[in-house]
Amino acid sequence: MDGALREYLHTPVLTKEVIEYLKCSEGGIFVDATVGEGGHALEVLWASQQSRVIGIDWDEEILEKARKRLDKYAERVTLVHDDFVYLPLILQGMGIKKVDGLLFDLGVSAFHFHEEGRGFAFQKDGPLDMRMDKRKKSTAYYIVNHFPIEGIEEILKRYGEERWAKRIARAIGDKRQQGDIKTTRDLAEIASRAIPRRYHPRRIHPATKTFLALRIAVNEELKNIEEVLKEAPLLLKRGRRICVISFHSLEDRIVKEAFKRMESTCICPPTLPQCVCGGREKVLQIITKKPLTARPKELRDNPRARSAKLRVAERV
Ligand SMILES: C[S@@+](CC[C@H](N)C(=O)[O-])C[C@H]1O[C@@H](n2cnc3c(N)ncnc32)[C@H](O)[C@@H]1O
């Protein structure tokens, strides 16, 4: 592979905002639950000499990149190869009860699209994999070749919000009759051909939503966020904050709802005329009523920031 690409670095989004909202200059123990190539983590370390970063990522290859990048600060950094849903156990294993900040920068890294053989990019030909965590069993290949057609349609509809889900799923079914669908190029072609040409989107590749939907399904991305947000805020010290950056409306909705639930002192269904749960302790105070988005300068420098939404809440 081209050396320049191998050294490709993911540009972190909304960095200034994250550092400010997490109160990084006050120092403390910060968990970067999606450390990736370590861009945000580096900024956290720079913000205060008194800070320590626990960086988690389930992708071993990308974690190696973070290790090299953060090497200069190794005594203040602990990197963990794991799924962030195990955050409470990870901290327990380190003897840490509470932390001073939590960051989730969701989804995939630019690294995943640039690295050969990972199967995330339709622009490159490669095996249909799409696992961020290679220890996971299910791949895009498995879903595309072994799931019932209705199941594939549902994935494309639900996670990709793809209006041509039925046609694409059927086209996948037809192609399967002739043999396995093996590569990203095969799948991109099937999806493109299934969408009538006059409806091809102008700005994005016609297979974009198909790839996004499969990636979310393979990595169970929405389930993971939902799971971790039930527990993670409880690991914060009072007055300290959680920042979540999402890139997809479904992710953002999960974050918004999770924060709202933890802010509320009542867990009764909204349809009940009065509270019957007896109330409960408020866990979070929402800091950003509306999600923060990138400023024009960042948008100019980093197009990926276009869809980024940052929500922040504080442990009370
Ligand atoms: C957008 S990138 C983070 C980039 C990082 N903030 C930086 O500055 O380089 C998201 C990262 O989260 C990781 N990731 C996604 N879901 C995860 C999970 N459930 N557990 C652990 N890591 C996860 C991905 O492997 C990817 O490296």
Image (cartoon, grey):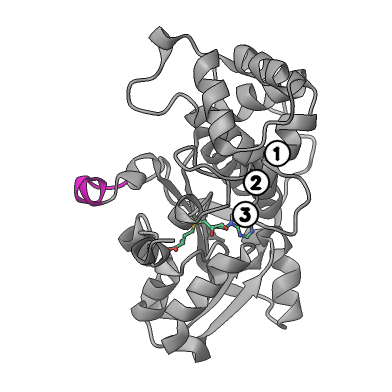
Q: Which amino acid does label 2 sit on?
A: Asp
Instruction: Give the structural element (helix, strand or loop) at label 3.
Output: loop
Query: Front-most of 287 and 256?
Result: 256
Give residue 94's position: percent from left, percent from top: 71, 82
For the N terminus, the quadrant is bottom left
Instruction: Give the structural element (helix, strand or loop) at label 1.
Output: helix
Query: Is there CB contact under 8 Å for labels 2 and 3?
Result: no
Whether the residue under disc 2 has CB within 8 Å of ligand 1:
no
Foreground label between 1 and 3: 1
Pointer 1 local density, CA inside 10 Å: few below 14, some 14–19, many at least 20: many
The reply to whether residue 281 is visible in this rendering is no
Query: Is there CB contact under 8 Å for labels 1 and 2?
Result: yes
Specify the segment rendered in magenta: 294-301
- Location of mark 1 (residue): 141
Q: Which mark is residue 129?
A: 2
Left or right: 212 as drawn, with respect to 49: right
Please check the rendered image and state whether residue 148 is part of the magenta-colored stretch, yes or no: no
Give residue 230's position: percent from left, percent from top: 70, 52
Of labels 1 and 2, earlier in sequence is 2
- Location of mark 3 (residue): 132
Whether the residue under disc 3 has CB within 8 Å of ligand 1:
yes
Give residue 64's position: percent from left, percent from top: 55, 74
Query: Front-most of 78 and 113?
Result: 113
Please check the rendered image and state whether residue 297 is part of the magenta-colored stretch, yes or no: yes
Foreground label between 2 and 3: 2
Q: In which quarter of the image is ligand 1?
A: bottom right
For the C terminus, the quadrant is bottom right
Give residue 80's position: percent from left, percent from top: 64, 74
Q: What residue type is labelled 1?
A: Tyr
